[in-house]
Image (cartoon, rainbow, N blue to C red):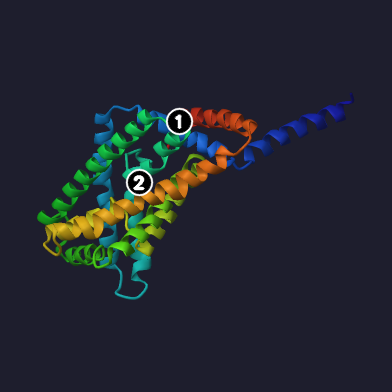
Amino acid sequence: MSQDASTKQVVNSHEKRDAKRREAPSAAVVYEAIRAEAETELTRPMIGLGWSALAAGLSMGFSLIAQALLYSYTPDAEWTPIVSSFGYSIGFLFVILGRQQLFTENTLTPVLEVLRVRSMSVVGKTLNLWLVVLLCNMVGVAIFAFALSYFDVLDPKIDEALKTISTREYGHPFGTVFVRAIFAGWLVALMLWLMPFAESARVGVIILVSYVIGLAHFPHIIAGSVAAIYAVFNSSHSFLEFLFGFFTPTLLGNTIGGVMMVAAVNYAQVAYSSNGDKEKSNAEASSSGNKRSSDGSSL
């Protein structure tokens, strides 16, 4: 073989490897990366999950603060929500990048493992995880809302913005809140589906998706509860209004949105892929997981 032909073959080999690296990951690869994380989450001690979920509830409170600050310092106009809704993304950034446990995240990751294994023991572990994470999320939310209500955390002029934002969580029929909450759960799960291979675009993905949730006012069980409970502490609304007018329909909608619209649908497309694709996805996801572990950047 001539030197030119040998050089051409080497160059082509390098080009092929480069092209391979630039390929978009298949749905099976994304599925395997998220499912592998679900295995880890389901085996974590409940006390660790609880503390992580408590931190997530506290962190999500900053979405309300950021919204109120932007709302207060933006001129009163029709386009004001376009600006103030960016504040909604702050809590999601803290929670997801900080690897804290959020209830709506867990409507995707462990459900993929449930669909794969189809074992009652895994179902039981998933239900326990949901209960612990939701309860601790809500404790964190309540602590944050209590602090905003009874301590001078912010400038008094921001209080009006807080009250205005908090009252928006009420006043809609049960069915309307439920349907809107499905879209919120759907979007959060879609965001998490994108995260394993988003790499440097992770921050942008989190901001854009959560911004849409905030701007469209799709109720989120944790982020929305900060404002809703703040209204209860300020006597603008009763606890029963919170429980039956916001919490229950939002919880049901978020859960259905996350489980049915993403976990079930995306699992179905992977389940009917060829065995070769599945083996390839396992190898690629394992390689990706090792890379994320080495650089510390995981979902």
Residue highlighted by disc 1: 117
Q: Please report the residue visible at 45 percent of the width from the left and 44 percent of the height from the top.
A: 263
Q: Is residue 68 left or right of residue 16?
A: left
141 above or below 82?
Answer: above
Q: Looking at this view, name the residue that lies furthest to the bottom.
A: 77
Q: Is residue 209 left or right of residue 287?
A: left
Residue 213: give x, y in percent of width and height: 38, 58
Q: Please report the residue visible at 26 percent of the width from the left and 43 percent of the height from the top.
A: 134
- Can residue 203 be seen here? no
Q: Looking at this view, name the residue that lies furthest to the top.
A: 1
Q: Please report the residue visible at 44 percent of the width from the left and 34 percent of the height from the top.
A: 113
For marks 1 and 2 on the same chain, the one whose residue lies earlier in the sequence = 2
Q: Amino acid at mark 1?
A: Val
Q: Choose between 62 and 279: the one closer to the eye.
A: 279
- Can residue 140 be seen here? yes
CB-based contact (under 8 Å), mark 1 and mark 2: no
Q: Is residue 40 left or right of residue 229?
A: right
Residue 255: give x, y in percent of width and height: 35, 48
Q: Amino acid at mark 2?
A: Thr
Residue 214: give x, y in percent of width and height: 35, 60
Q: Which quadrant: the C terminus?
A: top left
Q: Choose between 272 and 235: the one closer to the eye.
A: 272
Q: Which quadrant: the N terminus?
A: top right
Secondary structure of residue under mark 1: helix
Residue highlighted by disc 2: 104
Is the residue marked by circle 1 packed among few (<14), some (14-19), or many (20+) residues within 10 Å? few
Secondary structure of residue under mark 2: helix
